[in-house]
Image: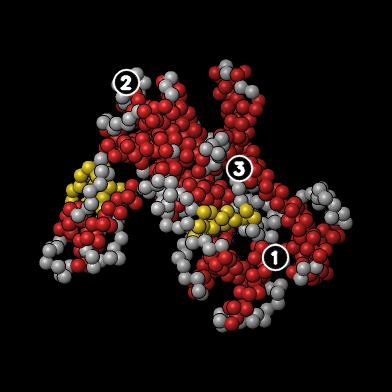
Amino acid sequence: ENGGGRAGSIKYQLAKLVEVSLRAVFPEESNVQPLIAVCTAKFGDYQCNNAMGIFSKIKGKSAEFKNPNSVGQAIARNLPYSDMIESTSVAGPGFVNIVLSNKWVAQNIQNMLSNGIGAWAPILSVEKAVVDFSSPNIAKEMHVGHLRSTIVGDTISRMLEFSGVEVLRRNHVGDWGTQFGMLIEHLFDNFPDWEDVGGQAIGDLQELYKASKRRFDDDPSFMERAQHAVVRLQGGEARYHNAWQRICEISRREFDIIYQHLDVYLEEKGESFYNPYIPNVLEELTRKGLIEESKGCPMDQKYQEFLCCLNDLLLLSRYRLNIEKAEWIIYVTDVGQAQHFDMVFSAAKASWLASDVNSGLYPRTNHVGLEFLDEAKSRSKAELVKRLGDNGKLKEWTDEELEKTAEAVGYGAVKYADLKNNRLTNYTFSFDQMLNDKGNTAVYLLYAHARICSIIRKSGKDIEDMKNSGTVVLDHADERILGLHLIQFAEIVEEACTNLLPSVLCEYLYNLSEIFTRFYTSCQVLGSAEETSRLLLCEATAVVMRKCFHLWELLPFTNY
Ligand code: ARG
């Protein structure tokens, strides 16, 4: 239904089967949705948890069902035939345990190998989403909160895109507001040649910001000029508008350097973009009696907060919902924005925007973006040079190779550290921890992947050829554990998307590499009777790893 021959996650496929059974046995309970979970006990791979809930609804109304267990029995009995399922059993208060067929799991893996990892993309319930991320402020520095938002937002976008969702990647740059009054006046006073292309004359924007802020605070006449400048800018006066654009351009160039480093794509639609929509919305709100004419002065702090909130609430939501027709709007921002979004979201709930609102904000530490990335890179280069030196292999590497590898490992480490840390817990960056080759780090995972590739290489076999001619079998217990973990990829991506937790995917991949190690320890690959099947399992593991690296934009997997 979503094209591409995707069957959806295991949970999704089982839910469809359970749904058929539920509708047949309990036609009156048409609101009940299938509840499928990974089995917690060893009686099965998955379980259906609907029985207790249904029993509490039909209790007393039916002579047939005396207890939850009998409900579970009926659900199990009425499951339509599927080659997915090997067997079912009903435990305790009606849990239906489902054992997947070994053969089906193996075929599923083979299918992915011949059709590509897209076969394991989950099927989500939305088709179009806005992801609002990065969103730094003009003339201010991009702090690590923005860096984090850039990394996390990009991965969320990629996961959604992989799942077939159309994603509008939006950089909601802070390019509007009263600070431009003082910036512009200061620019006029101190940089008479500000209109020159190249912009070298202006140089460091943050300095400009600081200097103009100092004047604004100390000099009442400058403050007054700055306030008038805001009005003239908002009125569209050309000289002011040009100066504003000039300032934005310089900032934009600085931001772009970071985006290029991280290989992140975003479309800028800053605060100012939504300006033309303000009058209509204000008018509509006033007509509906939802707001009163403000008596405050436009420079008032409260009034500015109100405007900012209004901008986000009405314009973004209306623009994004009504014009862009996004079904899901995701804001990736740091905890500094907590109050703002609290206000926006509670107002959204109170007004016509009755959609679901969830929030979870990212904590912030105070490193600055680019230097931080550079530091990670130079540390990883030093380590690389040291190790290669110890092995006597340094001579075999060109400078360019060294640079590229250091960049991949260094940037990867920063990205991964950001992604693996669940947004609900605070943390601090540690270079040593992040660049460690043991434990749950990018370095470890990249290494694990390289090791698998080298196993395949050593076999001397053409793996592409084997994908079509070979057969996967999962006879050994550790083969089956690996196989089952592999085919759970789709539901993990699904969970990471719906809960906006990229960390779930990090955990999954870390577990995969451990499960792989166990498999590799107990099952001989090269030279064994099962070599073909086992090499295919190696390859499937490597494919899943590469896809995760791609979703995390770890260089050089950005175009995988
Ligand atoms: N510019 C804000 C900041 O620097 C983030 C904006 C987030 N997005 C939004 N639609 N308000 O923290």
* Closer to us: 125 or 301: 125
Q: Which dot marks residue 263?
A: 3
Judged from the image, the secondary structure of the residue bearing numbered disc 1 is loop
Q: Is mark 1 within 8 Å of ligand 1?
A: no
Earlier in the chain: of badge 3 and badge 1, it is: 1
Percent x, y of residue 160: 48, 51
Task: Identify which amino acid the numbered label 3 is placed on.
Answer: Asp
Q: Which dot marks residue 528?
A: 2
> Is residue 274 visible in the rendered structure shown here?
yes
Judged from the image, the secondary structure of the residue bearing numbered disc 3 is loop
- Distance, label 3 to label 1, CA atoms, is 29 Å
Q: With respect to residue 32, does 553 lie above or below?
A: above
Earlier in the chain: of badge 1 and badge 2, it is: 1
Percent x, y of residue 50: 25, 58
Residue wearing tag 1: 177
Question: Which picture quadrant has residue 317?
Answer: bottom right
Task: Identify which amino acid the numbered label 1 is placed on.
Answer: Gly
Residue at the image point whose x is 46% and y is 67% from the top = 355
Give left or right: position of 334 versus 302. Answer: left
Q: Which dot marks residue 16?
A: none
Residue at the image point whose x is 42% and y is 22% from the top = 461
Residue at the image point whose x is 68% and y is 78% from the top = 296
- Distance, label 3 to label 2, CA atoms, is 42 Å
Judged from the image, the secondary structure of the residue bearing numbered disc 2 is loop
